[in-house]
Image (tube, coloured by chain):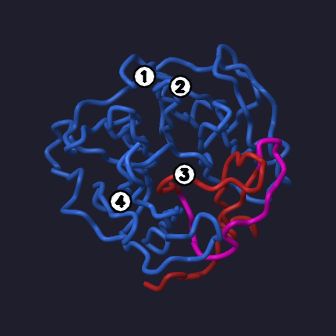
Chain colours: A red, B blue
Amino acid sequence: MSGVDLGFGTGQVLRYLANGTADGALVSSGPSYPTFMTFSGTVPEPGTATLLVMAVIPLWWRRR
Amino acid sequence: MGSSVWAGTTTLFVSDGVDDAVHRFDATTGAAISPNVSLLSVTGVATASNGDVYAASSNPSQVYRYNSMTGAQIGGPFVTFNGQNDGHDVQGPEGMAFAPNGNLYIADVTESNVHIYDTAGNSVGALTSPELSQPMDVAFSAAGDLYVVNPAMADVLVSVGGTQPLAEFFGTQTGGLVNPSALTFGPDGKLYVLDSSTDGGPAIRRYTAGGAYDGTVVSYAASSFSRTILRSGRMGSCT
């Protein structure tokens, strides 16, 4: 399997800051049906803002 | 803390049940890292304190261990499926999390419990409750308490230390949870719960350590999607 297998749809990984502001998509395509995620190590924070959470969204579900 | 083994690299692992793989990405840039980790019917993933990444499969229901830098599998199955109906097996693994003592907690959507495995992959029991039905995700607070998202009952349960009986986190239904499906602790120590289906569309809701509703952080347009998984940006140190 290649590094990025788009399959029949693509998922996104979105970032949100502590105040709830969307910080864009870290991953804009790749997983077909993302279900869970984890990190190795400490995730770099964007600028001086505190990174809150990342949310994985299956794009094919978003298009329903 | 000892010398870092990450050499400045942090990797995001995303399980994908359709591709039967765990995708790897640079956590800073989002760039894909090749190769993926191939695993049939992969579900939950979690990172141990030493940096190794664990992934569960529902076919068969086993857990595997991987080198986070290379993606290479380490040894055989960490948790094996023995089919003996002796309480060892997790039947429907979903979200997983490591306790501070290194034990692995797995939400079992089939058995409606949270299965616990020690650092050698041996079953050391399960947490159950009449209130627990088809749990989807688990997380540990900084204090070492286990939180379990409980979609069928639209609430969150907590086990002090991951050893005490599960009890309702919310004294009353607050925050309007309808179908919670994932949870994580933010760097502020507060609990963030994804509610996959509400009247106003999916939302991320926040709760204080005491269980008080602390507002809706993110809302999405109704019917835009029906599932996300949350993880905090901080996952602790690694040595």
The three-letter amino acid code for the residue at tag 3 is: Thr
Is circle 1 on the same chain as circle 4?
A: yes
Q: Which residue is mark 3?
A: A42
Q: CA distance from mark 3 to mark 4?
A: 25 Å
* Residue A53: % across, % down: 67, 48
Residue at point 24% right, 50% down? B79
Does residue A43 belong to the magenta stretch? no
Q: Is residue B208 visible?
A: yes
Q: Is residue B187 left or right of residue B141?
A: right
Q: Is residue B123 left or right of residue B26?
A: left
* Residue A58: % across, % down: 65, 65
Q: Do the CB atoms of the residues marked 2 and 4 lie less than 8 Å apart? A: no
Residue at point 54% right, 81% down? A4
Is circle 1 on the same chain as circle 3?
A: no
Q: Do the CB atoms of the residues marked 1 and 2 lie less than 8 Å apart? A: yes
Q: Which residue is mark 4?
A: B57
Q: Chain of mark 3?
A: A
The three-letter amino acid code for the residue at tag 4 is: Ser
Q: Chain of mark 2?
A: B
The three-letter amino acid code for the residue at tag 2 is: Leu
Magenta part of the protein: which range?
Answer: A17-35
Does residue A31 belong to the magenta stretch? yes
Q: CA distance from mark 1 to mark 3?
A: 34 Å
Q: Residues within 10 Å of mark 3 (few under 14, many from 20)?
A: some
Report the mark closest to the observer, 1 or 3.
Answer: 3
